[in-house]
Amino acid sequence: MFGIKVLEHRSKPERIADQAWQHLVSAVSTAGDSIRDTARSARHGSAGLADEAGDVVGSAADEARTRATRALDALAGRRPALPWTLLIGAALVGAAVGWAAGTAARAAGSRDRAADDIEFVDLERPDSPADPTNPAS
């Protein structure tokens, strides 16, 4: 009796979330029963088809379980977890691309410096006039 009174005093969003959860649980259980019945009839029909249906039932059950968990998390207000594998993979790819770009930039820069390392020497020719600023002349 006490539990019924507590349920009556919940807020409207809580009641709606509870109803949505009950409908979800009911739908998942009905789908699971339906899939199991289909798998049983397929097993009786043919052994080869039963193996394939078993795989379908397993993947469908996994999908239903995943969706039910996500729905429960959404109804509870929890955010989905970050895809750490994708984030770490993207960081590693970014680091590799940055390293390759840095290496290419250093290689291109070293080629330009090699052309700048050429020294030009001024030579006085015997028929040129003497330089008035040169103290040796």
Image (cartoon, grey):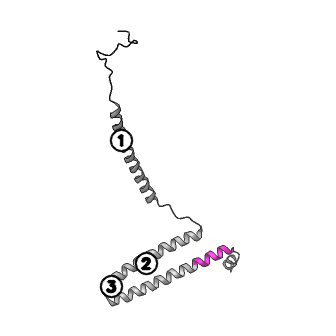
Identify the residue at horizontal 45%, vertical 86% (top origin): 34
Q: Are dots 2 and 1 in contact, CB under 8 Å? A: no
Q: Is residue 100 above or below residue 53?
A: above
Magenta-colored stretch includes residue 11: yes
Q: Earlier in the sequence, mark 2 or mark 3?
A: 3
User: Pointer 1: what residue?
Assistant: 108
Q: Earlier in the sequence, mark 2 or mark 1?
A: 2
Q: Which dot marks residue 49? A: 3
Observer-nearest of 128 and 124: 128
Determine the secondary structure under disc 1: helix
User: Pointer 2: what residue?
Assistant: 60
Amino acid type assigned to the residue bearing label 2 in the image: Ala
Marks 3 and 1, how far apart at CA: 62 Å
Please give the range of residues in magenta: 9-21
**Prevailing secondary structure of the magenta residues:** helix
Marks 2 and 1, how far apart at CA: 55 Å
Which class describes the residues within 10 Å of circle 2: few (<14), some (14-19), or many (20+)? some
Instruction: Give residue 6's position: percent from left, percent from top.
Output: 68, 76
Observer-nearest of 97 and 44: 97
Q: Earlier in the sequence, mark 3 or mark 1?
A: 3
Amino acid type assigned to the residue bearing label 3 in the image: Leu
